[in-house]
Image (cartoon, helix red, strand yellow):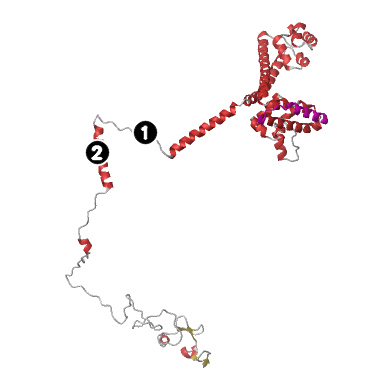
């Protein structure tokens, strides 16, 4: 049976069954037939009848091309010979045998014409001379060390030149500038007024603490005095100058507390307190004296602040008052910064906690005044208008601070008149 296949020349090819017999299939990858799944395994005699691979028609077997004996490729015709050419299989491998007594001699190395010339001697380098001199110096120094007259050389002091010197100079200049700035900060007269104003608050707290302990201790002897007097300073004066309740007469009490002298004398006669011994009374009187001295020191500081503020900030202290002006100046830090600050900042000096509480939670109302609340005009204003009065006072204080720092005029009277008019409107 023949099958006609289409192509350029209409070539006719035999089927695989006619070529190799029935029950066999062609293995295109290997180039020979193999038995089908239904047929038995082929015997040795069948294998011998297979066609030779070299003469078998059809496609290439898939193996690599081998060059023929002539050294040329079958397809291209190019030469495939190389220095690593393959020995033909027909010729046997011939191994040459060495004759008996043969000794292998090492071949002599060829020498070039340049190498036959004598090598050029190189001059001694600078490093070689240096190392030799170093060895000699070292040996000499070692020999000198053994002698008694050897004295080690002292190293000369090295002064850095260039960038290290510049760093030292720059460091000295910066230290000098810092010193001048610190000196300028504490040379101003407002610094003393600021420190004095800060000390007043501490003196007040100390006086209150000592007075409380002193009065409580004395109440064991005369408990009715605290309920009648209601004034710590006057009570301390009675304790120090009079002492024992048996000495409370009209003459002694009138000198210290004339307003309520009769009540105090009658209460001392009918007192239910215990008797007190002389050593305990002296300790109580000494404690009262120390408390009164703190009160006196506070009064001296206030007079000092008034004199200083009149020279440093005349208009500002006239509008705000010397003590309040010193507190506001202490919050600002210096007169220069106080003159630059806006009136809203001056208004809220001393109310920073309330301000940040409002900024953190907008439902909390913002503060309307800080230290300015101590001003007499703000305190006299009704509660609903205190914020408006504080804002007007802060504006006048900002104007006064600018005039004190940048100018020399006295404008305190005009500022006070404007404040009084605003107070009458809000009253």
Q: Is residue 219 visible?
A: no
In the image, farthest residue toward the left: 101
> Residue at point 20% right, 61% down?
116
| Image-quadrant location for residue 160 | top left
Q: Magenta region, mostly helix, strand or loop?
A: helix
How many C-alpha atoms fall within 10 Å of the one at disc 1: few (<14), some, or many (≥20)? few
**Is 114 rendered above or below residue 32?**
above
Find residue 301 and report its image quarter: top right
Queried whether the magenta region covers residue 361, the answer comes back as no
**Image location (x, y in percent) of residue 419:** 77, 29
Residue 225 place in picture, x, y as percent? 76, 13
Q: Nearer the viewer, residue 388 or 218?
A: 388
- In the figure, 299 relative to 29: above or below? above
Q: Secondary structure at mark 2?
A: helix
Tell which tag, 2 or 1, sits nearer the viewer: 1
Range drawn in magenta: 405-427
Of 176 and 297, the residue lying toward us: 176
- Compared across the picture, whether 340 is left or right of 120 comes to right
The residue that label 1 is drawn on is: 157
Let me know if residue 422 is in the magenta part: yes
Name the image quarter holding residue 204.
top right
123 relative to 30, above or below: above
Residue position for label 2: 139
């Amino acid at each position: 049976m023949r099958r006609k296949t289409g192509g350029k020349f209409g070539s006719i090819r035999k089927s695989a069954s006619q070529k190799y017999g029935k029950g066999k299939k062609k293995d295109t990858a290997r180039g020979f037939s193999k038995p089908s799944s239904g047929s038995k395994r082929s015997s040795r005699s069948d294998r011998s009848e297979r066609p030779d691979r070299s003469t078998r028609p059809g496609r290439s077997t898939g193996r690599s091309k081998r060059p023929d004996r002539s050294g040329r490729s079958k397809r291209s015709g190019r030469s495939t010979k190389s220095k690593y050419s393959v020995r033909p299989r027909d010729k046997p491998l011939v191994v040459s045998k060495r004759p008996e007594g043969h000794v292998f001699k090492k071949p002599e190395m060829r020498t070039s014409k340049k190498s036959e010339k004598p090598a050029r001697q190189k001059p001694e380098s600078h490093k070689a001379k240096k190392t030799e001199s170093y060895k000699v110096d070292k040996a000499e120094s070692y020999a000198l060390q053994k002698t008694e007259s050897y004295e080690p050389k002292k190293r000369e002091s090295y002064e850095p030149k260039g960038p290290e010197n510049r760093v030292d100079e720059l460091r000295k200049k910066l230290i000098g500038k810092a010193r001048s700035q610190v000196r300028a900060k504490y040379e101003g007269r407002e610094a003393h007024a600021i420190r004095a104003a800060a000390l007043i608050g501490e003196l007040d707290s100390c006086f209150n603490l000592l007075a409380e302990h002193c009065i409580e201790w004395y109440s064991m002897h005369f408990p009715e005095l605290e309920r009648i007097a209601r004034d710590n300073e006057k009570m301390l004066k009675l304790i120090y100058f009079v002492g024992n309740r048996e000495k409370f007469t009209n003459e002694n009490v009138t000198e210290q507390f004339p307003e309520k002298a009769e009540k105090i004398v009658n209460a001392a006669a009918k007192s239910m307190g215990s008797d007190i011994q002389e050593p305990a009374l002296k300790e109580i009187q000494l404690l009262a004296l120390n408390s009164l001295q703190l009160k006196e020191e506070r009064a001296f500081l206030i007079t000092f602040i008034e004199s200083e503020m009149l020279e440093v900030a005349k208009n500002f202290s006239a509008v705000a008052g010397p003590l309040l002006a010193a507190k506001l100046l202490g919050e600002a830090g210096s007169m220069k910064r106080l003159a630059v600050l806006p009136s809203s900042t001056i208004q809220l000096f001393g109310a920073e906690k309330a301000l940040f509480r409002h900024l953190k939670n907008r439902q909390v109302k913002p503060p309307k005044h800080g230290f300015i609340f101590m001003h007499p005009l703000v305190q006299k204003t009704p509660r609903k208008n205190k914020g408006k009065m504080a804002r007007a006072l802060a504006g006048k204080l900002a104007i006064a601070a600018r005039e004190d720092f940048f100018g020399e005029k006295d404008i305190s009277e005009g500022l006070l008149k404007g404040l009084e008019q605003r107070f009458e409107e809000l009253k």
